[in-house]
Amino acid sequence: MKYYIIAGEASGDLHGSNLMKGLYKEDPDADIRFWGGDLMNSVYLACRKDGMSGGGLVRHYKEGAIMGFWEVFRKARQLLGNVRFCEKDILSWKPDVVILIDYPGFNFKIAECTHKHGFKVFYYIAPKVWASREGRIKKLKKFVDKLFIVFPFEIQYFRKKGVDFVYEGNPLIDAIDDSPASNESRKDFLERNGLKDKPIIAMLAGSRKGEISTMMPVLREFAEKMTALPQYGGYQFIVAGAPARNMEDYTPYLNDCKADIKVLFGQTQSIVRNAEAAVVNSGTASLETVLLGTPQVVGFIMGSRITYAIAKKIVKVKYISLGNLIVDRLAFKEFIQADCNADNLVAEVRALIEDQAYRQKMLSEYACIRKALGGRGASAAVAKAMIRELSLPVCD
């Protein structure tokens, strides 16, 4: 069968790559054409068969990732152009199914178009309608043939809303447990990167350029203030360079820095796993940090005051981090907008490192979050479920 997959950011690339592995395993003749990133492309290059009809990477997500309401408004023409290009590409290629992964601003437009042209549409990693813009549920019901959800708290929510869904657990557990980061010693990690055997604090500024520009000044000040404390003078601070970004995105924030800050690319999970604590921009990375077992504090700054003002009016969840939402309590602290400042981050990271009881309590919460997510094999189970859905007879 022919599968057209659309992932618009780094987290979607991760989940899309694992889904593709499952599809290739269950359907050896799978022909996959996709919007995504390096991870999805690596799976495609490793698993594709010769003679397939035009599969492969159409466009890299780094060309279109935009953060925030105001930023989307400013780049509306670019987004519309991408949508039109994608629609034409799907109509030309004629896949058996279009699989949308999160990225709702773009993917809902594609869902509407492809559904109207008679294509089957699956949505994997549900848009966060439980957090904001609940009106999109109407679009899910109208334009999506099957929704595949990944969080346990979504089960009751979508059931109440009358949305047909499949739940097979969360794919991030496999992605973490099977990753090189989870199977490499600290010694090998340090030697491979030419790092000294000193304690590490991980800093994750986000994957979009807008997130990096808002978080890096705060993270730099945080690192400098930590380094100024005698007991932390020997620590090294490692920024996890985001996929599809380069050193030019970080260099302006590191010039004349008084802290030992390094940027490593393509090793986010390894950096977090080998750190004493992590400062994490909210998103999939905060849940990855939970599963890697590193105490964390979440910091998040919206791209503009306009964006933040809009978000405050429409976002209705208590927490911004998936881990906290899963257990419905503050398993780890979240500092948002003005509260995301160097002084607050210093105080919290010190508590995570110096207060062993506090640290252990957070790790106990991590165990609860992992248990709630279910066991291994989610990506493979979702691939099987998708193929099963595609094989069902069509009723008139």
Image (cartoon, rainbow, N blue to C red):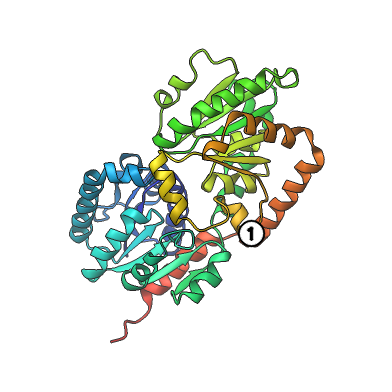
Q: Quadrant of the N terminus?
A: bottom left
The percent coordinates of residue 245 (x first, y second) are 40, 32
Relative to residue 141, is residue 194 depicted above or below?
A: above
Q: What is the quadrant of residue 388 in the picture?
A: bottom left
Residue 40 placement, left or right of 154: left
Residue 75 placement, left or right of 294: left
Relative to residue 4, is residue 185 depicted above or below?
A: above
The percent coordinates of residue 29 (x first, y second) are 35, 61
**Residue highlighted by disc 1:** 328
Relative to residue 293, is residue 83 depicted above or below?
A: below
The percent coordinates of residue 98 (x first, y second) are 32, 62
The percent coordinates of residue 28 (x first, y second) are 39, 61
Farthest residue toward the bottom?
396
Which residue is at 61% across, 24% downward? 223
Farthest residue toward the top?
256
Secondary structure at numbered mark 1: loop
Q: Is residue 92 visible?
A: yes
Q: Quadrant of the C terminus?
A: bottom left
Relative to residue 1, is residue 213 depicted above or below?
A: above
Rate crowding at label 1 as few (under 14), some (14 to 19) or many (20 or more) other CA atoms within 10 Å. Answer: some
Which residue is at 45% across, 25% downward? 250
Which residue is at 63% across, 36% downward? 278
Callout 1 amino acid: Asp
